[in-house]
Image (tube, helix red, strand yellow):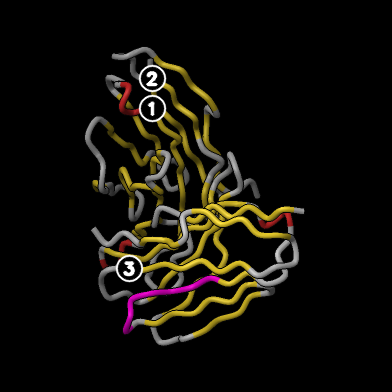
Amino acid sequence: NAGVTQTPKFQVLKTGQSMTLQCAQDMNHNSMYWYRQDPGMGLRLIYYSASEGTTDKGEVPNGYNVSRLNKREFSLRLESAAPSQTSVYFCASSTQGTRNNEQFFGPGTRLTVL
Amino acid sequence: SQQGEEDPQALSIQEGENATMNCSYKTSINNLQWYRQNSGRGLVHLILIRSNEREKHSGRLRVTLDTSKKSSSLLITASRAADTASYFCATPYGGATNKLIFGTGTLLAVQP
């Protein structure tokens, strides 16, 4: 099992460009998440998907859109990148339910917006 | 927000020593989790402690939870250079959605 995979690993964009970050999991998890990590800020939730076909906003959704393509895949789109979106982006997944909501993380995408 | 706060922000110890890091949170929880992040990598789940548990062990890890003080501690015994990483506590919110809110982390450096 590959767990949670993310592409690309690194990306440099110019202000105003768009791009999509891809995430896939092979653990048959219902829930998937996108976080961003900035120095000294910990992880902040951008969007999450509790189950296939549903998505909802997290703490910092502005400037992002998501698509839960199927149970395996959850993509994050930046329509018009801004320097403030320079960050490391992590995708995660978990089973549903409140008893064992351990999250499994991908390796991250390092995004720089110039 | 319900963000956990870790203390200290950074900790440097010698191999073989114990490392203790603390987490405080703001509202009632049904569990608290600890994660490790090696430099440049994703987070890895270490341990989950439920609100009705006071202490839990996993290998060299010992976690305590004091719900009356809204705090938790993570103790790593007999530390190794490979334990060098950032450690985050995380607490659930939003009901049954499995959302977690993470603290800002403790950066642990274990000197060989």
Q: Is residue B15 magenta?
A: no
What chain is tagged by disc 3? B
Residue at 24% x, 30% y: name it: A63
Q: Which numbered tag is attached to residue A107? A: none
Q: Tell me the distance, in whole angstroms, between the alpha carbons under discs 1 and 2.
A: 5 Å
Element on which disc 2 rests: strand
Residue at 25% x, 71% y: name it: B27
What chain is tagged by disc 1? A
- The residue lying toward the viewer, choosing from B99 and A32, is B99
Crowd around label 1: few <14 · some 14–19 · many ≥20 (10 Å):
some
Q: Which residues are magenta?
A: B68-74
| Amino acid identity at mark 2 | Val
Tell me if residue A12 comes above or below residue B53 in the rendering. Answer: above
Residue at 29% x, 64% y: name it: B93
Residue at 24% x, 46% y: name it: A57
Tell me if residue A20 comes above or below residue B83 in the rendering. Answer: above
Q: How many marks?
A: 3
Crowd around label 3: few <14 · some 14–19 · many ≥20 (10 Å):
many
- The residue lying toward the viewer, choosing from B10 and B69, is B10
Q: Which residue is mark 2?
A: A113
Q: Which residue is mark 1?
A: A86
Tell me if residue A111 comes above or below residue B65 in the rendering. Answer: above
Image quadrant assignment for residue A9: top right
Image quadrant assignment for residue B91: bottom left
Image quadrant assignment for residue B15: bottom right
Of marks 2 and 3, the one in the foreground? 3
| Amino acid identity at mark 1 | Thr
Q: Tell me residue A47's x, y (percent).
A: 31, 44
Asked whether the beta carbons under mark 1 and mark 2 sit within 8 Å of each other, the answer is yes
Q: Which residue is mark 3?
A: B25
Q: Tell me residue A96's x, y (percent).
A: 40, 64
